[in-house]
Amino acid sequence: MEVTTKQAKEKKQGVLKRIAGPVVTAVNLDAHMYDVVKVGKEELMGEVIKIQGDSVVIQVYEDTSGIRPGEPVSNTGLSLAVELGPGLLTSIYDGIQRPLEVLVDKMGNFIQRGVTAPGLSHEKKWTFKPLVKTGDKVEPGALLGEVQETNIVHKVMLPPNVKAGVVKTIKSGDYTIDEIICVLEDGREYPMIQRWPVRVPRPVKEKMNPTIPLITGQRILDGLFPIAKGGTAAIPGPFGSGKTVTQQQLAKWSDAEIVVYIGCGERGNEMTEVLTEFPHLEDPKSGKPLMERTVLIANTSNMPVAAREASVYTGITIAEYFRDMGYDVSLMADSTSRWAEAMREISSRLEEMPGEEGYPAYLAARLSEFYERAGLVKTLSGTRGSVSVIGAVSPPGGDFSEPVTQNTLRIVKVFWALDAKLSQRRHFPAINWLNSYSLYLEALHDYYDKEVSPEWNTIRSWAMEILQKEAELQEIVQLVGSDALPESEQVTIEVARMIREIFLQQNAYDSVDTFCDMKKQYAMMKSIKTYAELAYAAQLVGVSPAQINAVKAKNELAQIKFIKDYTPELAKIMKQMDDEFNTLRSAA
Amino acid sequence: MKEYRTISKIAGPLVFVEKTEPIAYGELVNIILSDGTTKRGQVLDTSDELVVVQIFETTAGIGRDSGVRFTGETIKMPVGREMLGRILSGGGKPIDGGPDLVPEKRLDINGAAINPYARGMPADFIQTGISTIDGTNTLVRGQKLPIFSGAGLPHNNVALQIARQAKVPGSTEKFAVVFAAMGITKEEANYFMQDFERTGALERAVVFLNLADDPAVERIITPRLALTTAEYLAFELGMHVLVILTDMTNYCEALRQIGAAREEVPGRRGYPGYMYTDLANLYERAGMIKGQKGSVTQIPILTMPGDDITHPIADLTGYITEGQIVVNRDLHRKGIYPPINVLPSLSRLMNLGIGKGKTREDHKKVSDQMYAGYAEGNDLRGLVAIVGKDALSERDRLLLEFADLFENKFVRQGYDEDRTIEDTLNIGWDLLSTLPVEQLTRIDRELINKYHPKFRTGAKKE
C-alpha cells in the first residue's frame, strides 16, 4: 500500500514517547484519526487510532522491537488507502497491500520490516482502449476505457468521488498506470490508477435486492441453503470441522467473475496450498486458470496483528472496485474471528473498557459495517454488480454463543453451521442440515423455477422434510432400536440416509465430485425421490423393509457423483430400480 | 554500559525502572544483584518515564538497590552446528558438563514470519510406523501436528515412538530432533533422555530442558530458543528437523502468569487475549521454504486440563496447528497402546502427502471408509447398552464388530512396532472386508476390485 509523499503535505514531525508492542504513543504530532504515519528511524508504517490532548496513539503494522522513545514520527496526511488499477488480479498481498512476491525479492524468505512496496506495478504497460470519446460527458464512476488484464477485462473508471466533466482528450495505446490517459475540459487529468481509503465504502447508485443464486457447485449449499449474488453468509465451526476447505471450495468453484480471498490470521501452509493450487485449477466456466480471476490477501497468524486488522478492509475495498466495473465478486474472509481478535488485542493495549469476553464494545458495529459493504448494486456507471461476502467464524471451543458468532448471525442472511460430530465421521462438507438456514430461498424461488426445474423448489422442501423427520425418528431409534419403528418409517430412515450419503456428502478431493452443477444436483435428488416413492408404494403392498433395503440399484446410485457423464449410467440405474421394485411388488 | 539504580517497583516477574535514557522496545536487560549475580530480562513497555522489564528467572534477590543494565540489543541466540548432541538449560546454557557453545551465528529468538509466498508446499509423507497416524492422520514434512493428551496418558511414549521411527520412505536421511521441555518433571525428562540415548538419537538431537522447578517465566523463551535452533538447522544447514515441544500447557500457564502480573485485561479463563497471536508465533515457525532443502516439522504436546478439548489452550492450538492427534483415556483404560482416538484426530495436510506415487492410490478412500465405519460402530455401542445386541440389524451388528476390530487390530500396536504404510493399509482392507461390499460407498469399484481381499488377485488369506 503506497502512500506517496509527493502528494501528501509533510506535516510537523512528532516524537515517540512510549512503545508497548504494536501500539505506540507520539507527542507533538499534528494528526487526524486514521492518518497513516511513519514511525521511527526505520519508517515503519502505522495508523493513528486515538488522539488525546497532545498524545497520538498509533497502531504499527510492523514489529516494533528495537524502537526507542525519542525517535521521530512523521505524518503522511493520508488515510490508509489501496492502489486500484490493472495488475490487481493474480496478486498476492499482505494485509496492507504489499505484494508478497515483491517482498520476497526485496527482503528474502522471511518478512522483515521497514520495507515498502507499491500494491501495483508502476512500470508495466497495459494496452488501454477507450470507451468514451472527446466531447462525452462523464459522471463520477463512469467507464473511461478497458484493459485486457488477464482473461478478465479491467474497466478503467473515473474515480467515484470527483465531479462530472466533459472529455477533452482520451488516449489509446500502451501506458503505465501512472500515465495520463484522460484529460477533461476543465483541465483535470486522470491516469488508470486510483486510490481509495480502505475504511470508506465506495459509493453506488442504488442497492438492490438479490434474486440470483451464487452457484457454488456444492450440493448442500446450492441445493439446501443457497446464498444469493450480493448476499452475506457466515460459516462458523470449531477447528477441524472444515471451514477452510469450504471457503477454498467456494473460492474455486463459485460462479462469481472475481474472487477475493482473505487469509486473515490463518495458517501459512494453508495459504501456500492456495497459492500452489489455484494457478493449476481451471475455472469451470472459462477454462482459464482460477488464479486469473483471483486476488489473494494473506496475513498469516504470525504476521503483525495490526496488519491483520487492516486486511479485511483492504480485501473488501478491492472487491468493491471490481463490483463497480459491473462484475459479480465473491469475497471469502477466513477468519473473521481472527480479525475480531486483532481488534481486541489493539483495544486492550489502548486500555479501553472491554465489552463481552474482552472484545471492544464497538465489535458489533464494526462487523455490521463490514458485512453491509456486500450487496447487489446499481453502480455509478449504471451497470449491475455485486459483492457476496462469506465470512468464516472460529468460535472458541465451538461454542456458537460467543460474541463474534452471535454478532455475525444478527447480520448475515445465510448460516452454514459446521458440526464437529459430522466431520469426525468424515461426513463432508460437515454442514449441519438442521441448524443451517438461508433467508434467500424466497428471493431465489423464481430463478430455480425457471433455470433448474419447476419441480426443484418442491423437491427441496421434500428433502428438508425427510431430514427433519429422520432427526425425530433417530431419537426414538436411540431408545428402542430401528426394528421397533413402523415399516413406513423404516423406509423414511433409509431415504434420509440416502439423502445424507448420496446428496449431502461431497468429496472435495475427487476430481468429478468436487463441483456439481444444478442440473446434476436436480437429477440426483430427483432419483432419490423416485426411489422413495417406489419404496413407499412397495411397502404399502406388503414388501418388507429388509427387502426394500436390499434393492441393488440403490447402492449403484451412490456412485453417480463420481461419474462425469452421468446421464446414461443414471438412466440405467433408474431402469434397474424400476425392474427390481416391479419384481418385489408382484411377489408380494 | 550505563547502570541504573532506579528500580521503583517489583511485581511478580516484572521490574519497573524509572528515569532512563531512551530504551528500545524488546531490548535485552541484565539485572545485577548486590552479590554480583546477573539475571536476564526483556523490555515489555518503554517510555520516557518508565521502562517495564520482564525477568526470565525468579525475581528473588532483586531489590531497589539492584543495578539495571540495558544491553542495547534484542535477545539473540548463539547457534552453531556443534549444538547437535548437546543438552541445554531452558535459557540456552549448556548443562551437560560439556564445553561452551561456539557460535557460528547469532539469531533473534523471535524469528520472523515466513513470507507465505516463499513457503514450500509440504508434500512429503513421513512414515511414523503408527497406523493411526500414517493411515488415518498422516504427518507430512513441514507440518505442525500437536498431540492433545491428558494427565497420566502415555503421550510421551507416542512422541518418542514418532521421533524414533519417523522417516520419509525412500530417503535414508534421518531427522534431527530438537526437543524442548517446559516445566516437565525431572523424571519425565530422564525418560526422554534415556530413550534418546538408548536409540542413539541424542547425537542428532538438541535438548532444551526447563524443568518443573525452573523459573516459570523462563518457559516463555525456551520454545523460542528451540525453534530458532531448528530454523538454523533447517534453513541454513539444510536438515530435516523434528521439533518436540512439551508441555505447551505449562507454557500457557507462564504466559497467564505474566499477563496477570502486568494487570492486563484477561481473555477466556484468565489467559491473555493475545494468546492466539503468541501461540501462532511459535507454531507458525514450522514449514518449508521453496527451493531450499530443510524443513521444520513440529509436534507440540499439551495436556488438556480435565481432558477438555474446548479449554483455551487446546482450542487455540487446534485453530493454529494443522490438525491434532488426540490421546484418549477410554482407550488407554482398555489397555490399548497407542490410545489414539482417531475420531477427533485430524491431519489437515494429509491429502497433500498421500495417494498415488506418495503412499498408495487407495489411501484416502480406505481411511474415509474406516472413519465412517468406526464412527457409526462407536455410536452403536451406546444403543447396545440400552436395547442389547439382539435388537440390532445385521448391518448394525457388523458395524459394531468393526469398531471393536478397528481398535484391536488397527489402533493397537507395539511400542517398538514399526508398520510400513503398506502394512497399515492392508490391515485396513482386512478390517473393511468384514463389512458387505455394497456398504463400502466411499470407495469406488475399481479400487475395491484391486485391493479388497475378496477380489484382489493373488491375495493371501489371513
Image: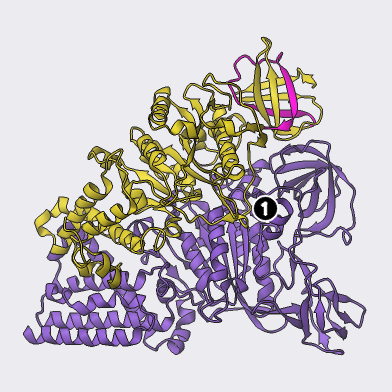
Q: Is residue A515 above or below residue A353?
A: below
Q: Is residue B265 magenta?
A: no
Looking at the image, which residue is at 22% across and 79% down?
A553
- Quadrant housing the C terminus of chain A: bottom left
Q: Amino acid at mark 1?
A: Ala
Looking at the image, which residue is at 25% across and 74% down?
A495
Q: Nearer the viewer, residue A285 or B236?
A: B236
Residue A198: name its quadrant. bottom right
Residue A272: name its quadrant. bottom right
Residue B417: name its quadrant. top left
Q: Nearer the viewer, residue A196 or A148?
A: A148
| Residue that lies at the very extreme toward the left in this rendered image | A587
Q: Is residue A542 left or right of residue A526?
A: left
Q: Chain of mark 1?
A: A
The magenta segment: B48-75
Q: Is residue B112 left or right of residue A473?
A: right
Q: Is residue B80 above or below residue B173?
A: above
Q: Is residue B6 above or below residue B230?
A: above
Please identify which colour was used for chain B in the image: yellow
Percent position of residue A31, x then y:
83, 51
Percent position of residue B103, x then y:
65, 30
Please identify which colour was used for chain A in the image: purple
Q: Which residue is mark 1?
A: A307
| Residue that lies at the very extreme toward the top in this rendered image | B35
Percent position of residue A518, x then y:
43, 81
- Quadrant housing the N terminus of chain A: bottom right
Q: How many marks?
A: 1
Q: Nearer the viewer, residue A201 or B150?
A: B150
Percent position of residue A500, x then y:
31, 69
Looking at the image, which residue is at 37% across and 37% down?
B155
At mark 1, the secondary structure is: helix
Q: Residues within 10 Å of mark 1 (few under 14, many from 20)?
A: many
